[in-house]
Structure formats: C-alpha cells, structure tokens
Amino acid sequence: MILLLDIGNTHTHLGLADERGVRKQANIKSALWRSGDAAGPVLRFIGKARVEGVALCSVVPAVTGKAVAFARKELGLAALELSPRTLTGVGINYPQPDRIGPDRLANAVALRHHFGAPSVAVAFGTALAFDVVDRHGDYVGGIIAPGLAAMTDYLHDKTALLPRITIQETSSVIGKSTREAMLIGAVHGYRGLVRELITELKRELNCRHLPVVATGGYAELIAAKLPEITAVEPKLTLEGLRLVWLAQQATRR
C-alpha cells in the first residue's frame, strides 16, 4: 500500500492506496505535526496494512520536514514530496513553478488523468482555489479567494453582534434571523462567486463545455445546486499523489 499525506493548514488528509485507487481515507489535525503527536494517529490509521511507499504534499513548510522524518523513522521509507521537480502527468506553464502549492499540482494531475484537458479543479478548503489545466495538458495557474468558513468567521470576529455559524443549506433567500441571513449570504453568495468565476474561465479558455471538478470540505454543499460543476471528487488531491507515486515507480523499473 501507499501512504498518502495531504497536509493542509487545518487538516491533514490521510490515504491508503494501491495501483487501482485510494482505498481508505481519514483526517487528522495538522497541529498534531507541530506538537509531535501525529505519529500515533497515523500509525493507527495504517493499522496492519503493509506500506511500501509514502507520497506527500504540504502547504505548511513548518511541518513538512516532520512528516518526512515520520516516514523515515516509523516506516523506514523515503517520502516522495510532490513539487515541480517530482511532478509527472501534467506540464507546467507558469512563471514561477516553485510558488505553486503542491496540493494544487496534485489536483491538476488527477484532473488531467480522469477528466482530460482543458479542465478545472475547485478546492473548497481554508481558501477557495481554482486550478486550471489548459487544452495542452499544462497547469497554467488559477484563482484564490477566501474560503467559506474564513469569510463567515471574519464576520463574527470583526463585529459585536454577528454570531459564529455552522455552514449548512438554507431553504429560503430571505433570512428571518441574523443566523439565517448570514447563512444565505454565505451559501448562496458563495455559489454566485463560484458560478461567475467558472463563466469567466470558460470565456478565457474558449471552452463551452469545461469539466469542473469540486473537492474539499464544502464541495458537496456548494456543488449541490451548481450545475456548472461536473463532479465532486473528495479524494482528488490524494488521487493525484497516488498517480505521481506510481509514475515515479514506473520510471525506476
């Protein structure tokens, strides 16, 4: 099995995969790497599985080395760290490749492999990130906006009377309470943001039928009433890591 680590600002997404796909998935708090407490939860996630390789992508440089050290110490394996230098499966047409988040590269790999080119991934995480693969199969950049929770938390943190809310679907577009009004603004407003950005991407890519794949924590909620989104793939980033690891192994045979 391959251990996959997608280390984000809030959560680390764990995966166990083989040549056919991602077989098991779980999440842990990324803060556990900082405190030195991640090894236990990761080893429990692995269980009795025989791990033959480790692939990771991290947007938290402070903990990347700790994840690499974990793989070496606990599993006796050298982790494959996704970067422009280890990337396979998609080209890069971007002025500063080293500035691209490795999770975005993983998304691009899975996107091109499963949905072709051109295509777009929309990741609903701490930030809202669009990643674009052009018709030549190259990663060409994207869009970054505040994440849904970040937007609503900001309202709570910066005002005296607005509560912290739990994001969920709404049944009306007229709020009968402060909480309902905030939910409507968040969910329906966010769909409007995503829809408009997809429209502009189609125009710039000159592509009427553009595959758009959503992933991340709020993907299912926002995509539910957005026909512009082709598919929801919760394991998109892990799948990209899996594909890169397999491709790297194939070149060594």
Image: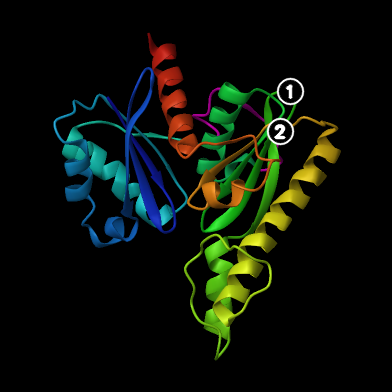
Read off the residue under disc 2.
Answer: 93
Q: Is disc 1 placed on a helix, strand or loop?
A: loop
Q: Is disc 2 placed on a helix, strand or loop?
A: loop
Residue nearest the viewer, comparing 106 with 87: 106
Q: Which quadrant of the structure image shows residue 202?
A: top right
At 57% across and 60% down in the image, what residue appears?
Answer: 147
Most common secondary structure along the magenta stretch: loop
Tell me, yes or no, whether the highlighted magenta stretch contains residue 219.
no
Q: Outermost residue, bottom direction?
A: 160
Q: Quadrant of the image for the N terminus?
A: top left
Residue nearest the viewer, comparing 58 with 252: 58
At 61% across and 61% down in the image, what residue appears?
Answer: 187
Read off the residue under disc 1.
Answer: 136
How far apart in space, not on screen, are marks 1 and 2 (Cα)? 10 Å
* 1 and 2 marks in contact (CB < 8 Å): yes
Looking at the image, residue 139 sits to the left or right of residue 57; the answer is: right
Instruction: In the rendered view, tell whether residue 146 sits above or below residue 119.
Output: below
